[in-house]
C-alpha cells in the first residue's frame, strides 16, 4: 500500500512496539533467562525429566520472545533509515522496498500486540484441542476431519509442535472425534477463541442427488494441566478399559490391546487414547486429557458462581462462532467479530490468523 506520511506511520509503529516491550517486561524476561540458564546447567537436572523438559522448554520460549522483540526493534530503527535514504536519493524503488517492509512490520508488531492481550489464568498453557462431528451425518464427520487438518496446518505454518492423541474414525468418511495437544506456550490463550460450533454449507459429495447440506462440528479447547494444579483422581473414581486400536473403516492398526479408555465415575467424563503403541503411553496421554477436563470443569463451576453473584445471565460466546460457506458462494465468516473472507481454500489450509487475532481482541473488549 502507498504510505502518504511514512514519518507518522513510523512514529505510530514505534509507539506500539514500545507499549508491547513494556507489557512483556523485557528486563524481567532477561532476568528469567539468566535464572533458567543456571537451572538448565545443573548436573542433576535430568534426574527429574518432567522438570528438565519444563525448564528447557521455558528457556527456549523466553529466549525466542526476546530475540523476536529485539529483531523487530532493529527493523523499526533500520526502516527509518531506509525511508530517509529513499527520500534523499529520490529513488522510487527504494521507497517501494521501504513501504513493503513497513507493511510487514505493521503485521508482525500487530500479531505481537495481540499476544499481550493473553493475560488469563491459563493463557500461557499448552492446549488440548478436541474436534467432534455434530449434526449432519457423514458430512459432519467429513467436516470434523477438515477442521482437524485446518488446525494442524495452522500449527505447521507457525512451527508449533503438536501431537494427535486420539482419533475416532467414522464408518463411511471423516472422523467422529479427534484430540491433539499443541505443545507451545500460549497455545491455550491463542486457540481458546476457536472453541464453539463451526458450521459448513456446501454441496454434499456424499449425496448422489447433489443437494446442498448443512453440517456442524464442535471444537473444545482446554489448558494442559501442570504439576501445580493438584488434580487428584483416586483409583476408586476411575474405570480403565483397554481395547485394540482401529483405523479408518475398522481396519486394525494394532494387534494388542494398547488403546485406553478412562471413565471418571463421579462426573461421567470419558476420554480415550489410541495413537501410541504402548498401553502405558496411551494411559498417560489419556490422564493428561482427563485432568485437563476436570480442571476446566472446576474453572467453569467457579465462573458460574461469580456470574451468579454478578447476576450474569448471558450465554457462552463460544457456541455459534463461525460459518464456512462453499455453495452457492465462497465465504468464511466469524459470527462474533464479523471478520470474513472469500478465500475459503486458504482458511481450510490453516490460514486462520486473522480470525484468531480478531477473536482475541473481541474477547478482551467483551470481557
Image (tube, rainbow, N blue to C red):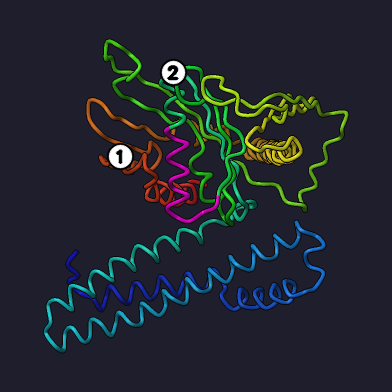
Question: Does 132 lie within the magenta span?
Answer: no
What is the residue that sits farthest to the top in this orientation? Answer: 209
Please name the residue shown 18% across and 72% down the image.
96
For this view, does 170 lie left or right of residue 242? Answer: left
The answer to whether residue 309 of the structure is visible from this angle is: no
* 1 or 2: tag closer to the N-terminus: 2
Name the foreground residue: 4 vs 236. 236
**Residue 345 has which mark?**
1
Q: Pointer 1 and pointer 2: residues touching (CB < 8 Å)?
A: no
The answer to whether residue 257 of the structure is visible from this angle is: yes
Please name the residue shown 51% across and 58% down the image.
117
- Where residue 306 appears, as percent x and y from the top left, is 67, 41
Res. 264 image quadrant: top right
Residue corresponding to mark 2: 138
- Where residue 147 appears, as percent x and y from the top left, is 44, 35
For this view, does 316 lie left or right of residue 268? Answer: left
Q: CA distance from mark 1 to mark 2?
A: 21 Å
- Where residue 213 appears, as percent x and y from the top left, is 34, 18
* Magenta residues, start to end: 146-161
Please name the residue shown 48% across and 41% down the image.
194
- Where residue 51 appears, as percent x and y from the top left, is 76, 60
Amino acid at each position: 500500500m502507498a504510505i502518504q506520511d511514512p514519518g507518522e506511520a513510523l512514529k505510530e509503529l514505534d509507539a506500539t512496539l514500545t507499549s508491547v516491550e513494556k507489557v512483556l517486561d523485557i528486563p524481567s524476561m532477561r532476568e528469567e533467562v539468566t535464572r533458567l540458564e543456571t537451572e538448565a546447567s545443573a548436573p542433576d537436572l535430568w534426574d527429574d525429566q518432567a522438570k528438565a523438559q519444563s525448564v528447557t522448554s521455558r528457556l527456549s520460549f523466553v529466549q525466542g520472545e526476546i530475540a523476536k522483540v529485539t529483531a523487530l526493534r532493529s527493523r523499526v530503527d533500520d526502516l527509518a533509515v531506509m525511508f530517509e535514504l529513499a527520500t534523499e536519493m529520490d529513488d522510487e524503488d527504494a521507497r517501494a522496498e521501504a513501504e513493503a517492509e513497513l507493511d510487514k512490520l505493521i503485521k508482525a508488531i500487530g500479531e505481537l500486540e495481540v499476544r499481550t492481550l493473553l493475560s488469563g489464568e491459563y493463557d500461557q498453557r499448552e492446549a488440548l484441542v478436541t474436534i467432534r462431528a455434530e449434526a449432519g451425518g457423514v458430512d459432519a464427520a467429513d467436516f470434523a476431519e477438515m477442521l482437524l487438518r485446518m488446525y494442524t496446518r495452522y500449527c505447521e505454518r507457525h512451527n508449533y509442535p503438536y501431537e494427535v492423541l486420539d482419533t475416532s474414525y467414522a464408518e463411511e468418511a471423516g472422523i467422529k472425534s479427534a484430540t491433539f495437544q499443541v505443545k507451545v506456550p500460549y497455545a491455550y490463550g491463542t486457540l481458546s477463541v476457536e472453541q464453539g460450533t463451526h458450521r459448513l454449507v456446501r454441496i454434499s459429495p456424499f449425496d448422489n442427488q447433489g443437494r446442498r447440506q448443512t453440517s456442524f462440528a464442535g471444537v473444545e479447547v482446554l489448558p494442559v494441566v501442570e504439576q501445580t494444579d493438584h488434580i487428584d483422581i483416586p483409583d476408586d473414581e476411575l474405570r480403565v478399559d483397554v481395547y485394540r486400536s482401529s483405523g479408518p473403516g475398522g481396519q486394525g492398526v494394532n494387534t494388542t490391546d494398547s488403546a485406553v479408555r478412562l471413565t471418571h465415575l463421579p462426573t461421567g467424563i470419558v476420554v480415550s487414547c489410541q495413537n501410541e503403541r504402548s498401553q502405558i503411553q496411551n494411559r498417560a496421554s489419556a490422564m493428561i486429557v482427563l485432568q485437563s477436563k476436570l480442571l476446566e470443569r472446576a474453572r467453569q463451576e467457579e465462573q458460574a458462581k461469580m456470574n451468579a453473584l454478578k447476576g450474569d445471565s448471558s450465554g457462552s460466546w463460544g457456541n455459534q462462532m463461525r460459518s464456512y460457506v462453499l455453495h452457492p458462494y465462497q465465504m468464511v465468516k466469524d459470527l462474533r467479530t464479523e471478520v470474513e473472507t472469500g478465500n475459503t481454500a486458504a482458511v481450510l489450509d490453516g490460514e486462520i490468523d486473522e480470525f484468531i487475532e480478531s477473536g482475541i481482541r473481541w474477547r478482551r473488549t467483551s470481557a
